[in-house]
Amino acid sequence: MPPTNTPLPPTPTNTPIPPTPTNTPPPPTATPTGGAALVLYDNAFRNGFSDGSFSTVSKNACDTTTYTSASCSYAVATGPYGALSFRHAGVDTGPYARFEFTMRPNGQPLSNYAVAFYSTRGAWLGEVVLGQSRVVATLPNGWVRVAVPLSELNPGAALVGEIDISSTRSTQLAKVNFDDVRLVAP
Ligand SMILES: [Ca+2]
């Protein structure tokens, strides 16, 4: 009877040497997120926003004669209840605390204008008529910076499809300029 080959015991494999831990760099220091912003307009529409302005008498999407950031701003003269309107497929405003922009009202009261947010389905989310209390900075050359908390414009944090800076008047208004339109984090 032929001897049966007894199986060789398995050769122990060398267990791999654990890799020498390399010095991992310390995690980067967390920088405050204050001021993080989503720009809707600066010299052009940005970050997926497009121009849906309506009831305008004249407009210039890049007026180089005045601005708060080079090289231009948005100039618009509205007809009855006209608006500079920002359209988007759907913006989550959750990360942001306020909607702000610079404006050159050209001698008109800010109460001639209101800000309104609408959902992607066109549902009204919130509206604020502007006024001096909304001015957070007075800038050179007749410009002001205006800010409105999103708690007043989109309290339910719905996806936003339209943001209007609209005339509250049934009459034609003088030309105004807007620049640096953005959503800003706390
Ligand atoms: Ca600009």
Image (cartoon, helix red, strand yellow):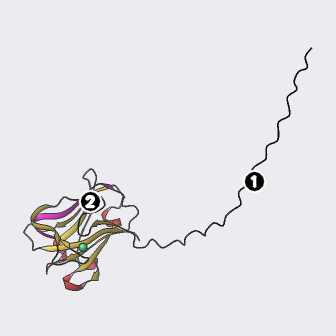
Q: Which residues are magenta?
A: 75-94
Name the side, left or right, on which 72 lies relative to 17: left
Name the side, left or right, on which 101 lies relative to 108: right
Name the side, left or right, on which 99 lies relative to 22: left
Q: Quadrant of the C terminus?
A: bottom left
Task: State which quadrant residue 183 falls in.
Answer: bottom left
Q: Is residue 148 above or below residue 48?
A: below
Give the spatial CA distance, label 2 vs label 1. 55 Å
Where residue 77 sits: x, y (%)?
Answer: 11, 69
Q: Is mark 1 within 8 Å of ligand 1?
A: no
Q: Residue furthest top?
A: 1
Task: State which quadrant residue 159 falls in.
Answer: bottom left
Where residue 22 sits: x, y (%)?
Answer: 67, 64
Q: Is residue 4 above or below residue 91?
A: above
Q: Amino acid at mark 2?
A: Phe
Neighbours of disc 1 within 10 Å: few (<14), some (14-19), many (20+): few
Where residue 37 sits: x, y (%)?
Answer: 36, 68
- Say whether residue 77 is magenta: yes
Secondary structure found at label 2: loop
Q: Residue furthest bottom?
A: 140
> In which quadrant of this rendering is ligand 1 seen?
bottom left
Between disc 2 and disc 1, the foreground one is 1
Q: Which mark is residue 49?
A: 2
Q: Residue furthest front?
A: 2
- Image point (11%, 73%), residue name: 175
- Say whether residue 2 is magenta: no
Q: Nearer the viewer, residue 152 or 79?
A: 79
Q: Which mark is residue 17?
A: 1
- Image point (24%, 80%), residue name: 144
Q: Quadrant of the N terminus?
A: top right
